Image: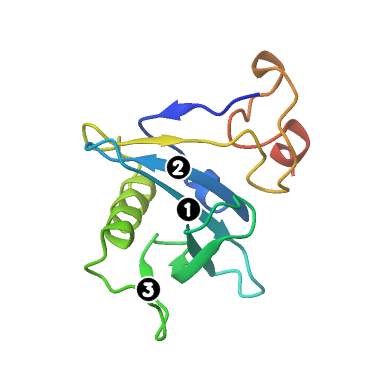
């Protein structure tokens, strides 16, 4: 099952715990991000795909506050707040946490995996009220 191209998304998607998505900018450039839930549940790790392996080649650049969406860079991050990928993520997080539609030309593509457990979404869209964010089992938890 392929992912969905979206102009907005709920906060629950961002704080699922194992979220992966691709942002397409107005210039057509793609950036893939991963948000992972660590032991500290208030701040999730944020990474940018920087290699060819979609599962492991992420460069972790900071944390995201799960209550506000605010992004804080790691002290030893190779990126700064002027880096385009960091600015794009921070802007989209702000839009998501404020419940707003993304700016013109920017879209988010969801993967075909649950943002909570990481398993492939196999339930048909009509039978899964949590599609395209989570599978029906994780959605009820």
Label 3: element kind? strand
Q: Residue at x 30, y 35 (%)?
A: 101
Taking the spot 67% from the left edge, 48% from the top edge, the residue there is: 116
Q: Nearer the viewer, mark 3 or mark 1?
A: 1
Q: Are marks 1 and 2 in contact (CB under 8 Å)?
A: yes
Lower sequence index among marks 1 and 2: 2
Percent of width and height locating residue 93: 37, 53
The residue beneath circle 3 is 72
The residue singled out by tag 1 in the image is 33
Which element is circle 1 on? strand
Q: Which residue is mark 2?
A: 22
Label 1 Cα crowd, 10 Å radius (few <14 / some 14-19 / many 20+)? many
- Whole-number angstrom distance, CA of label 3 to CA of label 1: 15 Å
Q: CA distance from mark 3 to mark 2?
A: 20 Å
Going from N to C along the chain, the mark reached first, 3 or 1, is 1
Q: Is residue 57 visible?
A: yes
Observer-nearest of 90 and 85: 85
Question: Quadrant of the rendered structure where residue 102 is?
Answer: top left
Residue situated furthest top in the rendering: 126
Taking depth in this image into account, of 102 and 113 the one nearest to the observer is: 113
Q: With respect to residue 118, does 17 lie above or below?
A: below
């Amino acid at each position: 099952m392929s992912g969905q191209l979206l102009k907005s998304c709920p906060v629950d998607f961002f704080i699922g715990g194992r979220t992966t998505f691709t942002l397409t900018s107005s210039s057509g450039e793609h950036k893939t991000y991963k948000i992972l839930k660590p032991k500290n549940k208030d701040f999730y790790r944020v990474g940018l795909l920087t290699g060819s392996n979609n599962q492991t080649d992420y460069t972790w650049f900071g944390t995201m506050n799960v209550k506000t969406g605010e992004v804080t860079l790691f002290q030893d991050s190779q990126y700064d707040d002027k880096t385009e990928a960091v600015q794009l993520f921070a802007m989209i997080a702000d839009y998501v946490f404020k419940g707003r539609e993304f700016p013109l030309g920017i879209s988010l593509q969801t993967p075909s995996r649950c943002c909570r457990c990481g398993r492939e979404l196999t339930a048909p869209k009509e039978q899964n009220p949590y599609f395209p964010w989570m599978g029906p089992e994780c959605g009820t938890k």
